[in-house]
Every structure is written in structure tokens, then in C-alpha cells.
Image: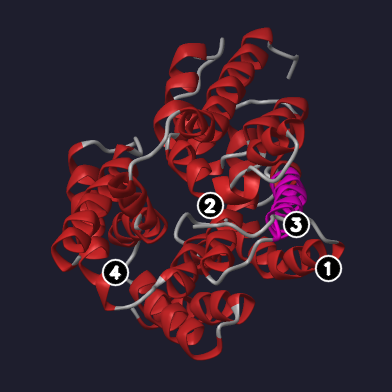
Amino acid sequence: MPEDISTLWAIGAMTAVTLACRCGGYFLFSRIKPTPRLRMALGHLPGCIFAAYVIPALLAGPAQNFAGAVTTLAAMAAFRNLGLSIAAGVAATWIASLAI
Amino acid sequence: MMTTEIVFTGAALRRGIWRALPLVAGLSPFGFVTGLITERHGLTLLDCLLMNGLVYAGASQLVALSNWTHPAPILAAAFAALVVNMRFALMGPVLAPWLDGLRPSHRYAALGILVDHAWALSVTDMRKGGRDVALFVGLSLPLWFGWMASTTTGFLCASFLNLPPHHPLFFGALAAFIALLVPLWRGKSDFLPWVVAGGVAMLLAQILPHTSWYIIGGALSGCLAGAAQDGRNA
């Protein structure tokens, strides 16, 4: 397929917007002084972003993913090993998909 | 707050690289699928390399590609990138204590390849008193190279491979996010904010599908709930 200039423009636009997201939040907060209350709220952000990502993604996926999620959490809580936990979760999903 | 000096050591850089490797493996099926779908929508190998190397945000790329046309939908693609990647704007400020220790050019280069997983592991280390920003850089670099390798492989395999959409391998990408919840858990006081974040996100995902407003809305609601709870306990 020949190179399509409009595709390159679209990729350029996506790059600009995404870069603005990555750098913009930091830039903004380096210019304003966050109040203690705002700083406190920001402390909750890491866990909340991941919870907000994971719950809808689980519900949108097939039922076997729940088996994988429980296994991943249990493995991570027990061993604190990322690679092992991801592998255990994928294996559990696989087994569950054969059973369902 | 953070009064100790921020440092950049080779040891932390290596530790970051080492700890990123399981994430690279876990995310590679997601990258593979992204490359595969990029080919299916008629993009060239050059487009695929540019999009993954520069935009470097798989979820937003999949949303943009799902509505792809020829000629390309420039505004729609930019809008998809905005709504899915807005969460990065919330992540940068949390890393500020570390990033402030870098030269501005290096600081923004590091922010340029910010992704969820490197960020979460860095925040976990920062909370334990870590002050070595090289850890963040060490975590970020392998994720970028791994992403380029898996997306390019997916693109090149697209013509002869067809995995079903719910193949268990694809769970690897979600599993990486789920596993990272464990080190982010600080104790019982996290329960209410997380439930609020997950619940609001679940509702918003129903109301506004194919965007990621649900991540922003859920995360901010959880933060408000957490701040209200802290205020009561203070």
C-alpha cells in the first residue's frame, strides 16, 4: 500500500496531543502551588487510577478473566513477583476458558 | 515532605531495567495485537513504527484505529488520543519530587515516554522513601523497546496469523494492571477510595463507551472520597 500523507498527519496530531497530556499535567503543577488538601487528594490517585482502569476492563471481558484476576492478585500478594503473577493469571485464564 | 536530594545512579537504572522485564513480557501480547490491528486497517510498516514509537499509548491507538478511514481521520484520531491519554496528565505531577531533580530537557524526555506501569512502580518506590529518579528511567526504557518489538512483530505476522479476540494470552495486558494494584495498596484507608473509583468508572464506562473518561472520572471521584475520608480522620 502506498504511503498516505493524511495518515502521517493523523499520527502527528496524535503524537502532539499525547505529548501534551504527558508533559502538561506536570508543567501545570510546577507553576501553581498545590494546597495541602489537593496534595492529600493527589496521594490517592495512583491506586484510584488503576482501580478505575481494571474494574470496567474486567467487566467488559469474558468470564474466564475473573479467574485470572483472582489468581494474579493472590500470586502477587503471596510472592510480590510481577512476572510470576502475570504468568499465573494467564495460565488460570487459559484453564478457565477450557472449563467454561 | 521530600527534603532529601534526588539522585541518579547506575544501580537504580539497572534495577529498573531488571524489574521492567516481566512487564515487557506481560504486555507483549497487547503490543502484538496492536500491531496486528494496525496492519488490518491498511497502515504501512512506516506508519506502524511511527505511531507506536511516537504516540506510544496502545489503548488510544486501538480506539483511533477502530474508526480509521482513508484518507485518515486527523481530528478524530487526535480526539481519541486526548480522551484516552488524559490520565497521563494526572500522573506527571505525582512524580514531581523525582522529576524536579532532573535537568528540564531530561525531565521532559522522561515524561515523553511515561506509561502506567513504570509510573506505578516508581510511585511505590517513592512512597517507601526512594529518591533515585534513575529507577523511573530504567523502568521506562525497556517498556518502550519491548513495545516496539511486539507491535512490529504483530504487524509483520498479521498476514498469516489470526488469534481469536478473547484468547487467554491477551489477558496478560490486563494482568499487569491487576498485579500492580497489590504494591499500590497502602492499607484499609485505601478501601473506600478504590471502591468509589471502580464503581464510578464502571458506571461511566456504560454511559460513555469507547472513550476513557471513565478512568479520569473514576480516579478523580476516588481521590475526592479519599480526601473527604482523610479530612474526617484528621
Discs 4 and 1 carry the same chain letter: yes
Q: Nearer the viewer, mark 2 or mark 4?
A: 4
Chain to which mark 4 belongs = B
Assess disc 1: are there few (<14), some (14-19) or many (≥20) residues with their C-alpha within 10 Å of its C-alpha. Answer: few
Discs 2 and 1 carry the same chain letter: yes
Quickly name the residue at label 2. Answer: B116
Which amino acid, mark 1?
Answer: Ala
Q: Position of residue A88 (x, y in %)?
A: 54, 82
- Residue A66 at least partly seen: yes
Q: Where is residue B91 in the image (x, y as percent from the top left)?
A: 48, 45
Q: Is residue A66 shown in magenta?
A: no
Chain to which mark 1 belongs = B
Assess disc 3: are there few (<14), some (14-19) or many (≥20) residues with their C-alpha within 10 Å of its C-alpha. Answer: some
Q: How many marks?
A: 4
Q: Residue at x 59, y 20 (%)?
A: A16
Q: Which residue is drawn at 55% across and 66% down?
A: B169
Q: In which quarter of the image is residue B22?
A: bottom right
Quickly name the residue at label 3. Answer: B7
Assess disc 4: are there few (<14), some (14-19) or many (≥20) residues with their C-alpha within 10 Å of its C-alpha. Answer: some
Which amino acid, mark 4?
Answer: Asp
Q: Which of marks 2 and 3 is in front?
A: 3
In the rendered structure, which segment of residues is drawn in magenta? B132-153
- Mark 2 and mark 3: Cα distance apart in space: 22 Å
Q: Is residue B137 shown in magenta?
A: yes
Disc 4 secondary structure class: helix
Q: Nearer the viewer, mark 2 or mark 1?
A: 1
Magenta region's main secondary structure? Answer: helix
Quickly name the residue at label 1. Answer: B11
The numbered mark, 2 or 3, whose residue comes first in the sequence reads 3
Q: Residue at x 22, y 48 (%)?
A: B221
The dot on residue B190 is 4
